[in-house]
Amino acid sequence: MVSLFNKSRTKIERTKTNFKRFLLSKINWDNQLIAIKGARGVGKTTLLLQHIKLNLPKDNSVLYISMDELFFTENNLIELAEEFSQNDGKYLFLDEVHKYPNWSREIKLIYDNHPDLKVVFTSSSILEIYKSESDLSRRVVSYTLPEMSIREFIELENSIKLPIYSLENILKNHVEIASEINQKIKPILTFNTYNQYGAYPYFTQGITEYQQKLINTINLIIEVDILAVENIDFQQVTKIKKLLFAIATSVPFIPNISKIAEKINISRQSLIKALTYLDKARLITIINKPNKGITILSKPDKLYLNNTNIINAIANKNANIGNIRETFFLNQLKIVSKIDLSNKSDFVVNDTYTFEIGGKNKTKKQIKDIKNAYVIKDNIEYGNGNIIPLWLFGFLY
C-alpha cells in the first residue's frame, strides 16, 4: 500500500491544472459511485487527477491507482478497498478498470460493503463498460467525456479562454457572438487546424506524430476492444478497417448492409452488431431519421466517422469536404442536443431546428418554407439572419 500511495501522490503533484476539460465542473463528485466513460486518449486520467489535486485533501484519505498496476498480480481490488477503508480511506479512484478481470463484480461488492467510500472509475474501452455495467446500472452515475470542442482546442493551444454558448444563443445572437470571437482568433484557420489535429489533447505531445498515434488508437479499438465483445476473426477485422476507409472517403455514407456484409463475408446480423460497437467506441456515428425504433439489429440510415480528425487520419488527401463539414457539425451537436437526419435537409435538432450544411456558396433552396431552418456555411467569418458560420458550433461545450 505504501508504494501505491507514493505513486498516487507523485502523479497528482505532477498534474497540470492550467487547462481543464469542461466536464470537470459538470460532474457531481458527491455520488458514491461514478463512471467516466470515453474514447481512448480524450483525457480521462488527467480529469481524475485534476479533481483530486484541486478539490481533495492531500493525505491518505485519497488514493489514485491505475488498474494495470503489478500490485494486482498478487492482490485483488476487494482486499485493497477493505484495507483502504479500514485506514480512513474516503476517496478511491480506479483508472482503466477494463484492464482488471472481474472489475464490474468487485466494484459492485465494494459499493455494497463500503457505503462511506466514494469510488470513481474510468475505462478507455467503452465497449467493455457497455458490456459489463449491467451489474452496476442501479448504483453507478455515468458521465461521458467526449473529444475536445474547438473552444477547448483554442484554450489548450493558445491559452485563450472563450465562453460556452448554448445552441439557442448561437441561433439567436450568432452575429454578435462571432464578432466577439473574431477579435481574438482567426476562426477559419482555427477550424481547419482543429479538423486536422484538435479533437484529442495529445496533440500537445507533437503534431507530426499526431495522426499516427490516432491510427494506433483506432487499431487498438478494432483489434482489442471489438474482438473482446464480438467473435470476429482477423480477416474480418481487416475488412472492417476497409469499411472505415470507405466511410472516410465518401460523401456521407448511406450503407447497403447486404452488399457490405457480402463483401466482408460476414452475416448481416454480425455486421450491424459490429457497426453498433464501433458507434459506442466513438469511431463512427450512426444517425437515423426521427422516431425510428432503434435496436442493436436495426439498419442504420447513415454512417459518419466520429470526428474530422479520424477522417483526415484515415482518408488523408482523399477526404471529402462535404463529409468533413457534416461530420464536424454532427460531432459537436450530439454532445449537447438530440440530432437526427432530416427528411428535407441534412439534420434536425431537438425535433425543432432544421440545418443544411454547405460551403460559402450554399443557397437556401433546400430549407425554403421550413420553419426554424438555418443554412450553416463553411469558410465564412460572419453570418446573417438564418445563415450561420459552421465553426461557431464548436463553442457548444
Image: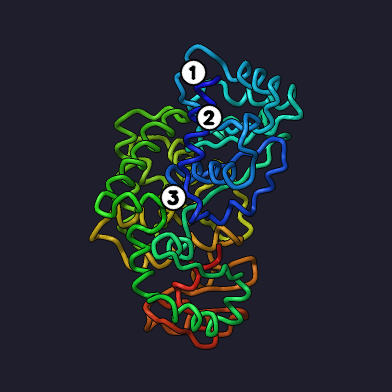
The image position of residue 304, as x and y in percent, is 42, 56
Does 317 sit above or below residue 365? Answer: above
**Three-letter amino acid code of the residue under disc 3:** Ile
- What is the distance, in whole Å, between disc 2 and disc 3 at their CAs? 31 Å
In front of the other: 171 or 326: 171
Question: Which residue is located at x 52 percent, y 24 percent?
Answer: 4
Marks 2, 3: nearer the viewer: 2
Alpha carbon distance from label 3 to label 1: 36 Å
**Pointer 1 residue:** 71
Q: Nearer the viewer, residue 87 or 169?
A: 87
Q: Secondary structure at mark 2?
A: strand
Give the left or right position of residue 81, taking residue 179 as reference: right
- Whole-number angstrom distance, CA of label 1 to CA of label 2: 10 Å
Check if mark 2's residue and mark 3's residue have beta carbons within 8 Å: no
The location of residue 189, given as percent across then percent down, is 34, 73
Residue at x 71% of width, y 30% of height = 117
Which disc number belongs to residue 185?
none
Q: Which residue is mark 2?
A: 65
From the image, tell me which residue sits under label 3: 284
Residue occupying image coordinates x 44% and y 80%: 182
In the rendered image, the residue lying farthest to the front is 59
Quick check: 238 above or below 114?
below
> Which mark is first along the chain, 2 or 1?
2
Q: What kind of residue is marked 1?
A: Phe
Q: Are marks 1 and 2 in contact (CB under 8 Å)?
A: yes
